[in-house]
Amino acid sequence: MQIILREKIRNLGDLGELVNVKPGYARNYLIPEGFALQATKTNLERFEAERLELEKLASGKLEQARARAKKLEAMSIVLLANAGDGGKLFGSIGTKDIAEAISAQGMDLERHEIRMPHGVIRELGEYQIAVHLHTDVEAHITVTVKSDGQAVFTEKEEDKDQYETRIGFFNPDEDE
């Protein structure tokens, strides 16, 4: 099915291009979401009439994304999490946690804008996280995961002694 793109779409085309896509992709996603029009003679004329307005909107979105990227690049996020002695987290840190931390600093960010291709964070450390703001704009933020000092499963020496005396040990060399 041939369509006219109303905005730039990654791996598909730029604003105003005529592209061929599978009919289901056009009917179920691109056309209902307003990203494209079916390529008919009347839609071509209608698109050409509103082309300047769409280009102005697209450039405005691009400038907004660049401004947000500049603010995000300056940010550094520190998240506290429960961790064991080896630095492994009890649980994980995902896009929701990062988005909430950035929002708490006064910057609006959606979960779907955060890219974590290697999956969620499961260890203490410093990570570079990509934030996809626009098809042409991607920012990187530094997320540092630190232990909050409340390790849940630390074993105390007195607990260890109680365990040993309660269970006892079997020694085959001892006679009873």
Image (cartoon, rainbow, N blue to C red):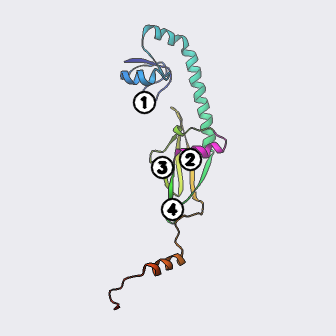
Residue annotated with mark 1: 11
The residue lying furthest to the bottom in this view is 175
Between the C-alphas of marks 1 and 4, the distance is 39 Å
Q: Could you tell which of marks 3 and 4 lies nearer the N-terminus?
A: 4
Between the C-alphas of marks 2 and 1, the distance is 29 Å
Amino acid type at circle 3 is: Val
**Dividing the picture into quarters, in which one does residue 100 lie?**
top right
Amino acid type at circle 4 is: Gly
Q: Residues within 10 Å of mark 2 (few under 14, many from 20)?
A: few
SS for dot 1? loop
Q: Could you tell which of marks 1 and 3 lies nearer the N-terminus?
A: 1
- From this view, report whether residue 87 is shown above or below residue 130: below
Q: Are marks 1 and 3 in contact (CB under 8 Å)?
A: no
Q: Position of 68 compared to 25: left or right?
A: right
Between the C-alphas of marks 3 and 4, the distance is 15 Å
Magenta stretch: give its range. 94-107
Residue annotated with mark 4: 87
**Dividing the picture into quarters, in which one does residue 158 lie?**
bottom right
Instruction: Tell me the number on the disc at residue 120.
Output: 3
Q: Would you say the magenta stretch is mainly helix, strand or loop?
A: helix
Q: Residues within 10 Å of mark 1 (few under 14, many from 20)?
A: few
The residue lying furthest to the left in this view is 172
Magenta region includes residue 110:
no
Magenta region includes residue 102:
yes
Residue annotated with mark 2: 97
Q: Nearer the viewer, mark 2 or mark 1?
A: 2
Q: Residues within 10 Å of mark 4 (few under 14, many from 20)?
A: some
Q: Nearer the viewer, residue 126 or 23?
A: 23
Q: Position of residue 166 (x, y in %)?
A: 46, 79
